[in-house]
Image (cartoon, helix red, strand yellow):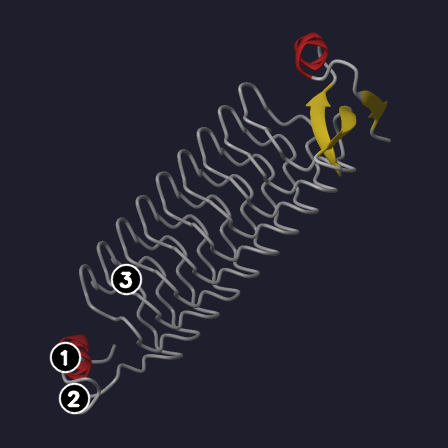
Amino acid sequence: MPNLKQILQDHSLWLSSNKTKGKQTDLSNQDLSGANLAYANLSYANLENANLTGADLIGANLTSTNLSYANLANANLYNANLKNAQLYKANLQNANLQNANLIYANLTGANLYYVYLANANLANANLANANLSYANLENANLYNASLANANLAYANLTGANLTGANLTYTNLYYANLFRTNLDKANLAYANLAYANLANANLENANLENVKGVQVFKCFYVENNEKKFNYFFNSTKAKKEMSKRLANRQCSWVE
């Protein structure tokens, strides 16, 4: 394993000197499995394709770090800062990312199977085509995140914030969406078969052509603009329809 102490010192000097002294860390393709990098400052470092299996990255600063194709399986990233980090096709299977900051992170195509993301901040993150099956995203912030074509089968999204999120073609088979905020979320063509949507907020959500559930679609005109409301086929939804959407034309979504 490389001399991490010296490498981190050089990187710290590189950062503090505005890149005029020291040396930017390049640990791409290195075997760092089990490494102790807790609270390390690796912002803007290159860790592409590095093996960080089981590494300790608690509280680490990985802002804008390149972790594309890196193997972070079973790594501990509790409270780590991964804002703007590049995690394209990274392997984060069974990693701990509780309370982590992943704002604007790129997780396109990443493997997040069984990952622990409770209370994590994923606002504006890109998770398109990512595998999040069985992931724990309880109370996570996914505001305006892209989850298009992602696999969230059996994922726990209890209390998560998905306001404005892109969930087109997303697989939410058996996902737990209890108390999830889906206001203004785009769920077009998403698979919601057997998902738990109890007490979920679907205000202004797009449920066009969702799979696995029957949806009631109502259209109406407001300020000369055609708008839509979507409800699931239930007694409660129908009562809400009659109360809020009186005299509006309605039709079932096929």
Farthest front residue in view? 223
Front disc: 1 or 2: 1
- Residue type at numbered disc 3: Gly
Marks 1 and 2, how far apart at CA = 9 Å
Residue 16 marker: 1
Residue flagged by tag 1: what amino acid is it?
Answer: Ser
Q: What label sits on residue 34 in the rendered view?
A: 3
Q: Do the residues labelled 2 and 3 touch (CB within 8 Å)?
A: no
Q: Which residue is found at the position 79% from the left and 20% from the top?
A: 248
Spot occupied by residue 12 in the image (x, y as percentages of width and height): 15, 77
Residue at 43%, 68% in the rendered image = 86
Tell me the element at label 3: loop
Instruction: Please state the horizontal and vertical placement of residue 200, each as a whole percent of the image.
Output: 54, 24
Of 73 and 164, the residue lying toward us: 164
Pick the quarter of the image with the N terminus.
Answer: bottom left
Identify residue type, mark 2. Answer: Gly
